[in-house]
Amino acid sequence: EVQLVESGGGFVQPGGSLRLSCVLSGFTFSNYWIHWVRQVPGQGLVWVSRINLNGGTTGYADYVRGRFTISRDYAKNTLYLQMDSLRAEDTAIYYCVRGLTAVSYFDYWGQGTRVTVSS
Amino acid sequence: SYALTQPPSVSVAPGQTAKIPCGGNNIGSKSVHWYQQKPGQAPVLVVFDDNNRPSGIPERFSGSNSGNTATLTISSVEAGDEADYYCQVWDITNDHLVFGTGTKVTVL
């Protein structure tokens, strides 16, 4: 069974940092990309970042580039999203999601981890 | 940046057909994917590549895409179909994945 399990969310002050984790299981990692998608409660879905589990190629949305860093630890079957210089507008539920390619649909979603940025 | 526009809400009676439009400039040239999200849950893929259903998704869900509008159609609507629905494409210009604004489907 394919599973993506996020953790690491919490409460942080503006300008602070947080690292989200996503543990992957139930599929062959080298064939897929993993993305982060966020959602402010009551609002829509927004793509944040992606990484190729095989070669490590990454991509970022303009509004997080330079502040967020996506990475993977192949040995631990774990994906990370390091979030620095956090702003109030980064407050959201962050979902770890699987994609067949860098630009395709998302076929499996984690349950999400909530990040709150507030003073 | 590329924008996808959806109506905020669509209401439909049980057993009827719901059509959810997703508007975007020349969206017919892109592959469109659709997600269903129920309250408190993560989204679920219901249609991919314009008109394909993942395993386990009822045949009542179908999609079309042409010109400037893609459409998700839900036939014989059931109470359990009440949810938010989002379309999604890849914006090749910015190399971003883009979601529509979302449509809340209410079953009367």
Image: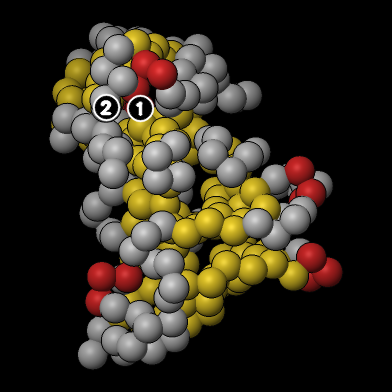
Residue B87: % across, % down: 36, 32
Tell me the quarter of the picture where residue A24 sits: bottom right
Q: Residue at x 39, y 12 (%)?
A: B64
- Callouts 2 and 1 close, C-beta under 8 Å: no
- Specify few, some or many for label 1: CA neighbours under 10 Å numbering under 14, 14-19, or 20 or more: some
Q: Which of B12 and B5 is in front in this view?
A: B5
Tell me the quarter of the picture where residue B7 sits: top left
Callout 1 secondary element: helix
Q: How was this image coloured?
A: secondary structure
State which quarter of the image contains the N terminus of chain A. top right
Count of picture labels: 2
Return the residue at label 2.
B24
Residue A7: % across, % down: 56, 72
Q: Which of A38 and A31 is in front in this view?
A: A31
Which amino acid type corresponds to the residue marked 1 in the rendered image?
Asp
Mark 1 belongs to which subunit?
Answer: B
Q: Is residue B71 visible?
A: no
Tell me the quarter of the picture where residue B68 sits: top left
Say which mark, if any, is on residue B81: 1
Residue B14: % across, % down: 26, 15
- Specify few, some or many for label 2: CA neighbours under 10 Å numbering under 14, 14-19, or 20 or more: some
Q: Is residue B47 above or below residue A30?
A: above
Front disc: 2 or 1: 2
